[in-house]
Amino acid sequence: MSEFYAKLGDEQQALIFDYRQPIILFNLANIYSKLKNEAQEKEVYHQARKIYQKWQDDQGEASFLIKIAERYGEQENSEKMLEYFNQALTVYRETGNLEAEANLLRDKISLIYSARLGDSEKGLNSLNQALEIYQIIGNQEKTAQTLAQLGDFYLKLENPEKAVEFYSKAVLIYQELNHFSDQAYTLRLVGKLYYELGKKQQALEMFQQAGNVVQEKGDIEQSVKILIQISSDYQELGDKKIAIEFYNQVIPILQQSGDYQQEASILRTIGQLYYELENPDKSLETFNQARNVYQQKGDKSGEAWTIYEIGKTYTILGEFQRALDFYQQALAIYEEEADANLREERTLDMLIRISRIYAYMGNSETAIEYCKKSLTNAQNFPPSNIVRRSEMFREIGKLCYQIGEPKKALESFNQYGFIYQKLGLDREVVGLIRIGEDYAKLGDSKQAIEFFNRARRIYQKSGFSEGETDTLISIGRIYYLS
């Protein structure tokens, strides 16, 4: 077609059709691929490649080979994918396009070897080749990124010492480039690895460096973000005391910036950590600080949340009357603040907690009253939050049974069952088994067997013999223990 237009003297149209030929051939090859005609498919790709060679378009030829490789990738043909990536790599090498060669080695070929073909050695070799090229051409940014990628690679190979070595090299380059965010992130990775290796002091030094990186630049928003991330890292590592230390570093920065909501939120988090560390005095002190912040700003919703947390802490302390006082204060605020965050969940949780406290204090009448309030509240709970609502019915069922209200307990458990019934047979049977297990733990063999049998009958009808066997085993265990 291009020759036809050339003869007519229309060079522009001839050129357009020339450039369309490889695309047409690419689509033709895809048709041959679907027809399982590998020889024709390969020949058509070869023809298209010769067109680029005729034009001396090295970049176009390499890009076309990469496009073929990616097509094979979509077909999950990793060997063919690698073959065409390597052909593109040869083009880059012959033309001296070092950066494109390194990019292909790092971003494509190393991943095929490691993720698709499971050849870690060749994947690692490809990354090291890319690193060497980036160093030769002086691309510091990509050198740092590749060093970090090598760190990731060694981490997957469960070689944390080697990972630390490469991450540490990347940190030095990020520092030279003033890439503070990447520097801080990589320092955090090194800190976590040191911690897991048992080198807690070195871990602390790395985390401190990560925190200092952005603070030294006076970027308040980033400083807060990094310090919170470090605190979260320590929480994940299970070191709540150090997490608190880093959270405490955030407080003065937030006070300086005037972000009272985040300040109070961090104080609440610290209070919760002290609560988990079984240090109720410090927990109360910190929760009260958060409460004062909310009060000063007139934030009723935040204040109610904090009062609720204070009530939980007094419960742990065994100061039940004070816990009840704080729960009642929080309930009163939530009554007024219809738009408060998680209002329904916390209100219902407090009603359950209040019922338990009264039961513990020997006030059965009031405990039952709040148990009934809990059930009514759960029935009016927003249907959109179906999972949370269903679990509340289970909690209330167990509570009512424990305080001597078996009828209310059954009503609540049945509400839980109805929710799961609406979700289909597979979910209904899960709900019935859970209720059976709850009754078994409560010591009510009769009700436990009743719910297990209901689940068994569903398994019978659906022909799922394994499920039926499991329920019969559960029933047999109850008979054996009773």
Image: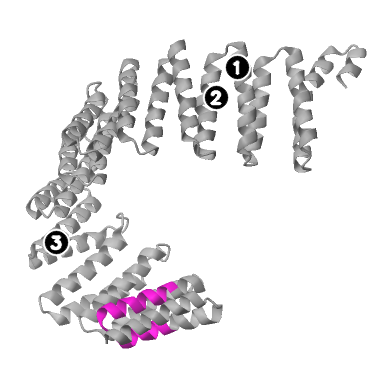
Is there CB contact under 8 Å for labels 1 and 3?
no
Give 425 or 22, whichever is nearer the viewer: 22
Q: Residue shown at 46%/74% (left/top)?
A: 428
**Which amino acid type corresponds to the residue marked 3 in the rendered image?**
Phe
Q: Which residues are magenta?
A: 430-453
Q: Which mark is residue 92?
A: 1
The mark that comes first in sequence, 1 or 3, is 1
Residue 381 location (% of width, % of height): 36, 67
Q: Position of residue 418 (x, y in %)?
A: 43, 76
Could you say where residue 325 lies in the image, as x and y percent from the top left?
12, 64
Tell me where residue 287 appears, x and y as whole percent. 14, 50
Secondary structure beneath label 1? helix
Q: Is residue 164 above or below residue 284?
A: above
Residues tagged 2 and 3 counted as in contact (Cβ below 8 A): no
Q: Which mark is residue 104?
A: 2
Q: What type is the residue that disc 2 sits on?
A: Leu
For this rendering, which residue is in front, 207 or 322?
207
Marks 1 and 3 sit apart, C-alpha to C-alpha, by: 71 Å
Q: What residue is rendered at 12% in x and 64% in y? A: 315
Residue at position x 23%, y 70% in the image: 352
Does the segment drawn in magenta span residue 2?
Answer: no
According to the image, label 3 marks what residue? 326
Query: Mark 3: few, some, or many residues within 10 Å (few <14, many ≥20)?
Result: many
Taking the magenta stretch, the answer to whether it contains residue 441 is: yes
Q: Quadrant of the C terminus?
A: bottom left
Q: Secondary structure at mark 3?
A: helix
